[in-house]
Image (spheres, rainbow, N blue to C red):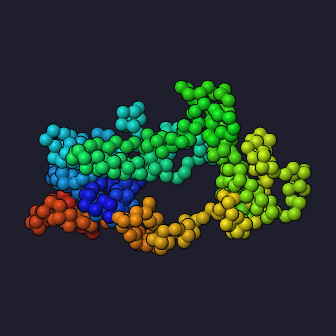
Amino acid sequence: MALDGVRVIEFAGLAPGPFAGLILADWGADVVRLDRVGAPSPDTLARHKRSVALDTKSAAGVALARRLIARADVLIDPFRPGVMERMGLGPDVFLGDGGLNRRLVFARLAGFAPKGPHRDMAGHDINYLALSGVLSMLPGTQDKPSFPLNLLADFGGGGMTCALGILLALIERSRSGLGQVISTDMVSGTRYLSTFPLSSALAPPLPGPSLFRVPSFPRSLPASAPDATPRMQHTLDGGAPFYNVYTCADDRWMSVGCLEPRFYAAFLERFLAALPENYVKENFGGWAPTLEQQFDREGEWPRLRRLFEDGFRMYGRDRWAKVFHGSDACAVPVLSPAEAGVLASNEEDRDGAAPAPHPLLSRTPARETAPARGLEHRSLLAPGAHTVEVLRQVLSLDDKEIEELRRNNVIGVPGEKPKL
């Protein structure tokens, strides 16, 4: 496996931190999660990881954490800026002159920019997405944009970007022999992930249909700039009828994404052929869609939207899926999570709800994933499940030392309540 031999210490957190650790674990890294003693474990992003339950509020617990980090290649810090320093586990302890582990990749993952005005505030994906400028561009209703679960900021701009930074630092370390601090914040990460739509929205207007042009804010284009129209009136923001989601007769959905003229032609041919004879002529006063007017936003799009909405409502989703199957119409059914798992291209995906690692590496593939057919089978990691194993293996502690740590509630194991 690509990351075989890489040891990672991951402080327990939510969403982006565990996802970064999951990526590393899937490709062979030994990821040890540091949990609080007696903490619950709602995290489902724990496959292939080990857990040590540690009281980092005690001096002995911090000392153990310091020793573990001193023997690691990577540290994942999911806390707000300054927390690790107050614990006595900041970067200078390991990377500074005379540091304990100058090869350490110290990966910091925060919500807001560490030097920005929101650095000390609490927040979640929707807040990071809001400050990134991306939320204002997303489809929703005419009144307000909607948000794509917590995917963009938490997992794209946060966890995935953090994992990328770690891999880059490991590559550089192979040349210099030195570690470094990786700083990822979800606002900046989301903006980088969204380079294409943000650049398209803020660039000077070009001839032809716009992708994301929206009213600009101070320090960008004036609101009166050509084509600076409101959101949901452009090609990729829910405005174009040929790039949208439609409800079918059974209240399930079809996705349509026929942007290019030749794909739009293939879509229209099959869509119109599936409607009752003379339907368009009788219900639209003799009007019919044409290829030449595909990007006529003012004249064509309102009628096209009504035609597509009414047409898809005539039949169920699966019937429409058959109409477009095997064509270049760029129209496919919107699948449920269970349906998507059955059709997944990766065999490991088909056995359960947990997506298999991706991309696929031909010579050093990722670890196999176990099926996740129910809650009891998910990759839930009991805090402290590997405490004794890790302390013996990594720190060479003996039974007497481990028992003393347990007696003093410095460490924990599953099913054992802290001693009063």
Label tally? 0
Q: Is residue 145 above or below residue 368?
A: above
Q: Position of residue 72 (x, y in %)?
A: 22, 54
Q: Residue at x 43, y 73 (%)?
A: 371
Q: Residue at x 76, y 66 (%)?
A: 315
Residue closest to the eye, 231 or 101: 101
Q: Which picture quadrant has residue 31? A: bottom left
Q: Is residue 190 above or below residue 248?
A: above
Residue closest to the eye, 381 or 418: 381
Q: Quadrant of the N terminus?
A: bottom left
Q: Position of residue 267 (x, y in %)?
A: 73, 58
Q: Is residue 294 left or right of residue 369?
A: right
Q: Is residue 385 left or right of residue 287?
A: left
Q: Quadrant of the C terminus?
A: bottom left
Q: Residue at x 25, y 47 (%)?
A: 175
Q: Position of residue 269 (x, y in %)?
A: 77, 59
Asked whether residue 232 appears in the rendered view, the answer is no
Residue closest to the eye, 181 or 39: 181
Asked whether residue 186 appears in the rendered view, the answer is yes
Q: Is residue 2 left or right of residue 226?
A: left
Residue closest to the eye, 326 or 225: 326
Q: Position of residue 125 (x, y in %)?
A: 47, 47
Q: Is residue 212 left or right of residue 322?
A: left
Q: Residue at x 46, y 42 (%)?
A: 192
